[in-house]
Structures are given as C-alpha cells and as structure tokens.
Image: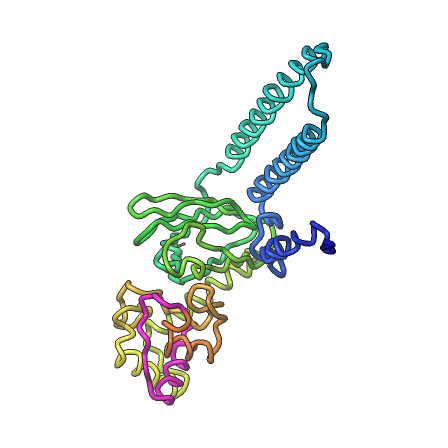
Amino acid sequence: MKRTALPWVRLLPAAALLLTGCHPGHRQSALHTAAEASGEIARLWWAMFIVLTASFVLVMALTWIAIRRRPRTDDSPTTTVGWQNRFVILGGIAFPTAVLTWMLLDSLGTSRALRQPPEGLRIEVVGYQWWWDVRYPEHDLAIANEIYLPVGEPVVIELSSADVIHSFWVPNLHGKVDMLPEFPTRIVLRADRPGRWRGQCAEFCGRQHAWMAFEVVALPREEFDAWLAERAAARAALAADTPPANDAIARGRDVFFRESCHTCHPVHGTPADSLIGPDLTHLGTRLTLGAGRIANTDEALARWIADPQGLKPGNLMPDTPLADADLADLVAYLRSLR
Ligand code: CUA
C-alpha cells in the first residue's frame, strides 16, 4: 500500500496542543513581560532555548550521519583513530561541560538579579484550597483573588498557606514562589506598566488546583490611591451602618444573615466576622468569582450561590437553595458591597 501522508503531518496534533498554551492578550505569559524581573527570566529562557535547540539539532544530525555511514570492515585503515579521539573529547566532554557551566552561571546570575530588598507597600497573601486571601495591613483592607498594585513601585507580597502547599505565580511579572503552611515566604513585584494579568497557583494542591487563579491589576499611583480611597469610603459607610440604597439590598442583607452566609464570610462593619471563607466586604468590585472560575456579574453570582459545587466541585461552599426572590435580593446586597 502506498503511504500518502507526509511523516510531519502526524506532528500536527502535537503542534496544536502546544498552541493551547497561547492566551489571548498574553495575560498569563512568561514571554510577554511587564517587569524587570520577568524580563530577566525571559532572557534566560530564550538563551537556554536557543543554545539547547542548537545542541539538539547538532546531536540529531550527527546521529543521522552515524546511522547512514557504511559499517567499517576489518581491513579499513585505522589512521582516523586520532581524529576520532579528539572528536570524542571535544564533542563529548568539552562541549557539554562548557554548555552546562554557562547554564549554571547564567542561572545563578539571574537568581541574584531577581533578589530585591523587602521594601515597599506590603500585601499579605494566604493560599487556601482553592482561593487567595489578600490583605493590605497598612490600609485595613481585605479582598480576595485579586491584587491591585501601584505601577513602578516595589510591592512586597508576604506569602503563606492555610492548608497545603500552593505556589504564587504571575508569569508576566516574576517567577514562582511556594506558599507553605507555617513557613512564610515572600516575593517583591514591580510592574513597569499599567495592566491586568492572570496569576495562577503553580503547585498541584487538590481537585480545583486549576481554578485557583487570581487577577493582578497594576494602576498608576493616582488611580491606585483613588482605588484605596473608594474602598475605605465603602468600609466607612458599612461601619456607620448607613441605610441600604434600596429595599432589595435591605432584604438581601437579611437573607445573608438568615441563611448563615456570615458563619463563613466576613463583611466589614457587620456582625459577620468569621474568617473561614473569602472576605465579601468589596465583593461588588470583584473581577471574578470562584478564584477566576467566572466573571462577576449578577447572573454569575446567582449561579454561584445556588450551585457552587456544580461550578467548582469540591470547594467548601455548600449549594444554597433559595426562593428566586430571596436569591435576587441576596445578589443585590452582595453586589452593593463595593
Ligand atoms: Cu493551590 Cu494549586
């Protein structure tokens, strides 16, 4: 039978699989950098990629030549032995030693360049199965699954875990750092330009590891200050027990306490002060729900409350069956928390 398909056609599925790593806008990419640190890492990556690809091609070419060579017969002249010895010493010892030494030294140099003094705005991030608790201790601010930063300034992210080992990774800005229970670690981020990127837990941590994502938003200093001020004003209004803007929100607040949501979720200035689940004080401004699972809209929030196990099986939040009117009121209340 005649073969019609070219051998390389069989590689197409593998190539297609590689393409799935591309993300529109490169929001989660170590090769589209927005910081000096990630730029250093990308430079090292490209250098290794080029040198190692060249080495691989060279080795494959030599293997091909060796396979195609005529086998030596007993009466072949042995005058080439000296040349062969030199080839083995250069190609088999000197070349790999040089490449491996360069890789080691360049990696050490890069690690050194990444080390930053822990000075700047402090943010505490604690990993949970499967979400991120984010606190700005100097601003009495608690959010979840997103980190806002001022552009061009170092920001010290103090990392820890409440349960298993997680790993903090914003590839556009920096490398990975493990988050360990009872052993604090840290990373210093500095975004060189405004933008929004996707962070991801980079250590397998259980069933919903893949949906342990977060958003990083870098804002120019004035916008960052305005963002802090808006959150502070919202908390002040909650603490002063300002009457809700409409009846639906007032009824929704009653549903929140009646259905025991407060036994897991804190809301600033209310009796809800448990620390089991994500802080909901600013839930209305949250970009996503379920740590990156779905965008935060009225419909998505209603779906999340009714069926968190359907959207993210295994997470700690139980399904909450509610009458349609109660669910709509609860959504109105939670989305009013800004
Ligand atoms: Cu947390 Cu994987």
Establish if 318 lies above or below 26.
Answer: below
Q: Quadrant of the N terminus?
A: bottom right
Location of ligand 1 given as a quarter of the image = bottom left
Establish if 328 lies above or below 17.
Answer: below
Q: Residue at x 47, y 64 (%)?
A: 292
The reply, left or right, for residue 85 in relation to residue 168 is: right
Question: How many circles with numbers are drawn on the protein?
Answer: 0
Establish if 59 lies above or below 15.
Answer: above
Q: Residue at x 39, y 87 (%)?
A: 248
- Is residue 336 rendered magenta in the image? yes
Place of residue 79 in the rendered image (x, y in percent of width and height, measured from the top left): 72, 10
Q: Residue at x 47, y 58 (%)?
A: 147
The reply, left or right, for residue 100 in relation to residue 290 is: right
Q: Quadrant of the C terminus?
A: bottom left
Bounds of the magenta segment: 312-338
- Is residue 316 rendered magenta in the image? yes
Place of residue 289 in the rendered image (x, y in percent of width and height, measured from the top left): 44, 69
Q: Residue at x 69, y 24 (%)?
A: 71
Place of residue 74 in the rendered image (x, y in percent of width and height, measured from the top left): 68, 15
Quarter location, residue 28: bottom right
The reply, left or right, for residue 29 in relation to residue 2 is: left
Say which of 178 and 145 sits in front: 178
